[in-house]
Amino acid sequence: MAGSHKAGHARGGGRGGGADAPPVRKRRRRGVRLALAVLVSFVVLAVAGAGWLYLQLNGNINTFDDGGVSGDRPAASTKGQNVLVIGSDSRAGDNVQYGHGQGDIGRSDTAFLMHVHADHKHATAVSIPRDSLVDVPPCKLPNGQWTKEQHNVMFNSAFSVGDTIKGNPACTQNTVEKLTGLRVDHTVVVDFAGFAKMTQAVGGVQVCLPKDVYEGDLNPNRHSRGEKIFDKGVQDVSGQKALDYVRIRHGIGDGSDIGRIQRQQAFISSLMKKVKSQGFSPTHLLPLAQAATKSMTVDPGLGSADKLISFAMSMRNIDLHNTKFVTLPWRYEGARVAVVKPQADALFAALRADRTVDGKDAGGKSGEGKQEDVNAKSPSPIPPSGAGISVAVYNGTTVKGLASRGADALKAGGYTVTGTATAATHDFVHTVIEYGPNDKAHADELAQHFPGALLRSAKAPGLSVILGSKYAADPTATPAAAPTAVPSEVAAKARSADDSVCSNLSYG
């Protein structure tokens, strides 16, 4: 189990995103992945609910089999909802006319997790780079068998497990839950054709290009610059042009998929602005609602028009400024992307606590999130006894004697400490509790002795605690002092849906 401690830190090098970072070299087929347009369409569905339209839309909706959703899931939370949005670039059916490439196996190169805060006034979308190296838990194949867990593989490989046209949304959902510790309440998949038709339905979307773009920037396999397809500056795009815009990677910024994510976030924001500016007249709503529902594959929890309408109504008061886009903390690892664990863990801990990007507590139901002091103290309950439970203790800092100090505290609480040692790395900020199969309940109890600790599942049985610098600074910290703030480096790069369409379009 000690070998897994490396997952708690950033492995070597600085945080990704610098101008001198090497570009990602090996790429698979490109496709449109801007499925947040589906979330915009939910609002459309909430308004366009006339009876005859309801029946038509209801017949458009496809669902995926949720029998492949893992039984080992994070606990459900009353603090907001989490919606996983996946883009499929399968060329099957109507999608064959879009994109460049062939193949009818469902692939996903972009996904994001949208956290709708409990106050229904704020939302935070976390983009997950397709090349992120993650652990993919066991997933169900079309024949009913389950795969073995895969370690340190590309994130987008989860959607392709089973090599089917429709992809494997449940496998991607399992992977996201394991990565984030957040329970995914709903999963939505959108395809090429639906995205293109949605942009046409709204009459085009405003985008901004930092430079002239040529065919060779869209498809480097041409080995020539080709014709110019976009002029530098602001312009409206729809259909194939919209797909081309969000697929561009080469020749802009550092040429990476990470840079492209920022342009995709800008596009989604612009689409949301366009829909809102047009208002909700039937003339505008019907084409958009039809395009959206025909393009979607959803979990059974959203598998009818009334369920979609109900979900849409729950988000009707979220405005553009309070809709934030961030990217999973990352750094380059060769041609792939490593997840920077301390920052990523803190980001997801903040969402679990229903903190917004700018530090507000959005867990209430009064509407406006209130600013609170995350270091405020409050009385804490007496932690449960650890009688009969064994745990190993590791020092994840450079503070001498920390493991012994933590071990003494656990012994006083009735735990049996099997040993103390120094962790593989010394840059843990938050205390991490790792637990094996069937040990989740004990891990939850153990976490009460270490307020703010992050929990991670592991393959090996048993419990271990890796103490971080927050524990070293204040081992008596109360639950109110839990790490509920989005890391400053993540917050500084966040995009609001009402930001300028020309701002923050790429790294490099």
Image (tube, rainbow, N blue to C red):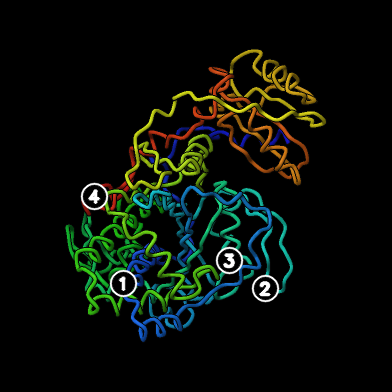
Q: Tell me the residue at 68%/35% (across/down).
A: 445
- Asked which quadrant contains residue 435, the reply is top right
Taking the spot 22% from the left edge, 57% from the top edge, the residue there is 209
Marks 1 and 2 sit apart, C-alpha to C-alpha, by 37 Å
Q: Which residue is mark 2?
A: 142
Q: Amino acid at mark 3?
A: Ser
Query: Mark 1 or mark 2: which comes first in sequence?
Result: 1
Q: Is residue 18 visible?
A: no
From the viewer's perspective, is 270 left or right of 150?
Answer: left
Question: Residue 478 in the image: x percent, y percent?
Answer: 54, 25
**Label 2 is placed on what type of residue?**
Pro
How far apart marks 2 and 4 lie (CA) works out to 43 Å
- Amino acid type assigned to the residue bearing label 1 in the image: Val
- Pointer 3 residue: 160
Please name which of the two marks, 1 or 2, marks the residue nearer to the observer.
1
Disc 2 element: loop
- According to the picture, the residue beneath numbered tag 4 turns out to be 499
Q: Residues within 10 Å of mark 1 (few under 14, many from 20)?
A: some
Q: Position of residue 241 (x, y in %)?
A: 28, 71
Q: Give the residue type at disc 4.
A: Asp
Q: How many residues crowd mark 4 within 10 Å: few (<14), some (14–19), many (20+)? A: some
Give the image location of residue 123, x and y in percent: 38, 51
- How packed is label 2: few (under 14 Cα within 10 Å), some, or many (20 or more)? few
Can you identify the residue that label 1 sits on? 47
What is the secondary structure assignment of the residue under circle 1? helix
